[in-house]
Amino acid sequence: MEILKNPDVARVFDAYPKIIRKKLLYVRQLILESAAESAGVNRLEETLKWGAPSYLTGIGSTIRVGWKESVPDQYALYFHCQTSLVSTFKALYGDLFKFEGDRAIIFGENDEISIDELKHCISLSLTYHRIKHLPMLGA
């Protein structure tokens, strides 16, 4: 799988507080692994959208990762709010994750991450345009 990297992304990660940076770099690694494991994903672009590290494929919906100074002990994965992604995640994993409306999965800096379930959510997003017609995105 081809990964297209943008050097500006590394600078954004470097600007995050140390603890949050470590958490977000771990989430980044999960995104890279999920992309490599997702059928049909041949290329992943790492770029900036709205100043946040973002991940795109030709067959999926954009995933952004980020942190806000206004909520310093949280970080998040953001998804396009006009998709059925987060509503599907809630139906599948509502007991495992915290959500912000129809746009994000939110983590506290001390939260344990359910890795397999999060990678499943990431994979659904990275392949969304191929599966959006399926009930529960084919999950």
Image: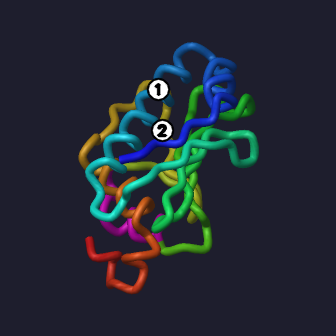
Residue that mark 1 sits on: 23
Residue 107: mark = 2
Relative height, residue 9 to residue 87 (above, below): above
Task: Please tell me in which quadrant of the rendered image residue 9 appears.
Answer: top right
Q: Residues within 10 Å of mark 1 (few under 14, many from 20)?
A: some
> Mark 1 belongs to which amino acid?
Lys
Question: Horizontal placement of 22 versus 37: left or right?
Answer: right
- Seen from the viewer's position, the closer of residues 114 and 110 is 114
Residue 125: mark = none
Read off the magenta span: 85-96
Q: What's the residue at 48%, 38% (across, down)?
A: 107
Query: Where's residue 88, x and y in %?
Result: 39, 70
Task: Please tell me in which quadrant of the rendered image residue 20 appears.
Answer: top right
> Mark 2 belongs to which amino acid?
Phe
Q: What's the residue at 36%, 39% (across, down)?
A: 30
Contact check, label 1 and label 2, Cβ < 8 Å: yes
Question: Horizontal placement of 69 versus 35: left or right?
Answer: right
